[in-house]
Image: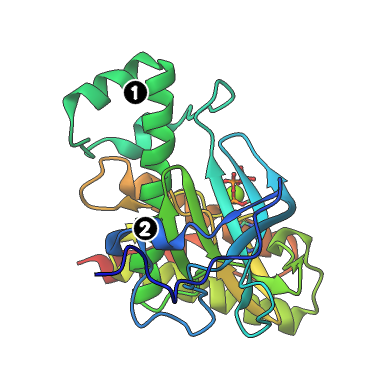
């Protein structure tokens, strides 16, 4: 037997400061998005992730723009959004108890650590939120809801499809100015999103014109870590109602005649 494989090819590039080797090869199958995988997902171990900038910093997470590409192979290059949950002091899941009621952590040591808000506890919580968002994105994607395709989850980071053109992120619904006909179309899409969630027995839990992106006239829903099971969670119905009111109010303020109560009763009809 040869001491080493003479055919081994060594990389001629090394990641720079704002780069890393693609984290894809290190993920397990359950940390990867649903099949069939879109053809644009770059899975090569030769790929390098480059941080292009920050899309938005938030209270609980920061969203970065990432390019995942195989050097010198333009066919294998994609822009992704990386949502990184904070495990640090600034992480403040003030509403988290209402959302996670009825959920259980696998290890009671972790449950106690999260409750104690120790550094370890905060890291566990950040990882749990990343997993929750990845899981919700995966189920909703499979249910046909327009969400970014979830590429992978690694620790506290969710990598997903970037909704935008080139490196320009799609605007939030809140920033969109449209004619009444266009508004009507956007509202119908939002209603369909609410219906699809309800059919799956879920409420988004934080639906607002800030968590809906408009890309080429299509509405895409984001920010799913707090998706709740409407029946199992004692706050589920209240959250469903709040989702309806938040989005309907926005359309009403823009002159569209929609009724949150009507939408809510339609949704409830899909639950049972
Ligand atoms: N997949 C994506 N494609 C394009 N832009 C995105 C994507 N995911 C997030 N963004 C941008 O980053 C912002 C923050 O994302 P998100 O709402 O998921 O995080 P958040 O920390 O909960 O933010 P907030 O506290 O403002 O709700 C979005 O409003 C959007 O502008
Ligand atoms: Mg958000």
Where residue 85 appears, as percent x and y from the top left, is 52, 40
Where residue 54 appears, as percent x and y from the top left, is 73, 49
Above-or-below relation of 185 to 151: below
Residue at the location (28% across, 52% down)? 229
Question: In terms of depth relative to the viewer, which is nearer, 177 or 157?
Answer: 157
Q: Earlier in the sequence, mark 1 or mark 2?
A: 2
Where residue 139 appears, as percent x and y from the top left, is 33, 66
Where residue 166 appears, as percent x and y from the top left, is 76, 74
Residue at the location (38% across, 22% down)? 120
The local crowd at label 2, few if under 14, some if 14 to 19, many if 20 or more residues have their Cα within 10 Å, is few
Residue at the location (45% across, 65% down)? 150
Q: Is residue 9 left or right of residue 226?
A: right
The local crowd at label 1, few if under 14, some if 14 to 19, many if 20 or more residues have their Cα within 10 Å, is some
**What residue is shown with label 1?**
114
Name the secondary structure under disc 1. helix
Whether ligand 1 has any atom under 8 Å from the Cβ at mark 1 is answered as: no
Above-or-below relation of 66 to 100: below
Above-or-below relation of 42 to 17: below
Q: Is residue 203 visible?
A: no
Q: Is residue 195 visible?
A: yes
Q: Which mark is residue 27?
A: 2
Residue at the location (70% across, 72% down)? 164
Label 1 vs label 2, nearer the camera: 2
Above-or-below relation of 248 to 145: above
The Cα atoms of the two marked residues, 1 and 2, are separated by 25 Å
């Amino acid at each position: 037997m040869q001491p080493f494989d003479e055919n081994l090819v060594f990389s001629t590039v090394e990641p720079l400061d704002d780069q890393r080797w693609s984290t894809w090869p290190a993920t397990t199958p359950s940390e990867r998005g649903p099949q069939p995988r879109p053809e644009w997902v770059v899975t090569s171990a030769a790929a390098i992730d480059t941080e292009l900038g920050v899309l938005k910093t938030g209270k609980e997470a920061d969203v970065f723009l990432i390019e995942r590409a195989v050097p010198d192979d333009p066919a294998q290059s994609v822009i992704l959004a990386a949502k990184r949950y904070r495990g640090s002091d600034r992480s403040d899941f003030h509403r988290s108890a209402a959302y996670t009621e009825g959920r259980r952590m696998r290890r009671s040591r972790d449950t106690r650590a999260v409750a104690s808000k120790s550094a370890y506890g905060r890291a566990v919580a950040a990882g749990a939120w990343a997993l929750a968002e990845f899981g919700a994105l995966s189920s909703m994607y499979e249910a046909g809801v327009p969400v970014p395709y979830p590429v992978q989850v690694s620790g506290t980071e969710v990598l997903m499809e970037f909704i935008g053109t080139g490196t320009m992120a799609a605007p939030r619904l809140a920033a969109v100015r449209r004619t009444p006909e266009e508004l009507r179309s956007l509202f119908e899409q939002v209603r369909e999103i609410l219906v699809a969630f309800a059919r799956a027995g879920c409420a988004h839990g934080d639906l607002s014109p800030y968590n809906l992106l408009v890309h080429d006239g299509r509405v895409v829903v984001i920010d799913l870590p707090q998706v709740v099971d409407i029946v199992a969670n004692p706050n589920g119905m209240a959250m469903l109602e709040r989702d309806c009111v938040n989005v309907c109010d926005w359309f009403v303020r823009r002159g569209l005649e929609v009724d949150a109560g009507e939408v809510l009763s339609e949704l409830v009809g899909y639950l049972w």
